[in-house]
Amino acid sequence: MGRPKTQTDRRLTLVAAAESMIAKRGLAGVTLRDVANEAGMSSSALLYYYPGLKELLDDVQKKAVERFCTQRAASVAAIADPRVRLKTMLESGLPTDPDDQLCRLLLELGAYSRSDASYAARHITLFERQVAIYVGILEAGAATGIFKLNAASEVIARSLVVLEDGLGLHLVNVVPAVDHASAMAILTGYAELATGCSLR
């Protein structure tokens, strides 16, 4: 029974190594040999666990999507006040700095969704799960009278996630067009307009 656990552990090691290499070199600069070296194994050993780079990156994306969505949901789960929940959710949606590995990873892998249906499907899942969290917060705030929504909750939620994605791309660029404080101000400003509620 030890072998499956070893295989699982090795796969997790390879996923972590791939994440590290993407953070260092960008997705376009990563090869199987790079990942194998980072994981401390030979390229032929890596091919025992993954037949190619695409299959390895599939696992990297699955785990990154799950980790990001789980973290965002957990950050607001225990907060009762919709105003504080919304503010916390906004803060969790942007890269903390250009070296934010998880956000950079998701943005890099998102590029594959333009040409690969499986990546596109997971990218949609990432989007919809974040939208669902926002919808829950917005509707709870509206139900208690704290928020006065200026559009349907789903429209506002989708707009917030799209804003996060666009601002996030700028924040992880080598030369960012906006800094984190400015990006948060833009995102918060829209949320305040959409909910009729001060969040600052």
Image: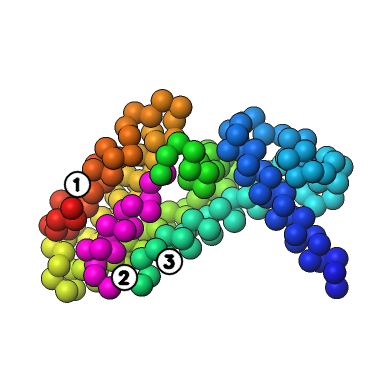
Q: Residues within 10 Å of mark 1 (few under 14, many from 20)?
A: some
Magenta region includes residue 92: yes
Whole-angstrom CA distance, mark 1 to mark 3, is: 24 Å
Which type of secondary structure does the marked residue at label 2 adopt? loop
Q: Which residues are magenta?
A: 79-95
> Which residue carries the number 1 mark?
189
Find residue 21 and report its horizontal and vertical position in percent: 65, 38
Which type of secondary structure does the marked residue at label 3 adopt? helix
Find residue 60 and report its horizontal and vertical position in percent: 63, 50
Find residue 62 and report its horizontal and vertical position in percent: 59, 55
Tell me the kind of residue under disc 1. Gly
In front here: 44 or 128?
Answer: 44
**Residue positioned most to the top:** 175
Tell me the kind of residue under disc 2. Ile
Residue 102 showing in the rendered view = yes
**Image position of 105 (left or right of 37):** left
Whole-angstrom CA distance, mark 2 to mark 3, is: 10 Å
> Which residue carries the number 3 mark?
74
Answer yes or no: do the residues labelled 1 and 2 have beta carbons within 8 Å?
Answer: no
In front: label 1 or label 3: 3
Residue at image position (27%, 60%) is 86
Compare marks 2 and 3 and give the one earlier in the sequence: 3
Compare marks 1 and 3 and give the one earlier in the sequence: 3
Tell me the kind of residue under disc 3. Ala
> Which residue carries the number 2 mark?
79
Residue at image position (85%, 73%) is 1
Find residue 96 and report its horizontal and vertical position in percent: 41, 44
Occupied quadrant, residue 151: bottom left
In front: label 1 or label 2: 2
Magenta region includes residue 125: no
Q: Residues within 10 Å of mark 3 (few under 14, many from 20)?
A: few
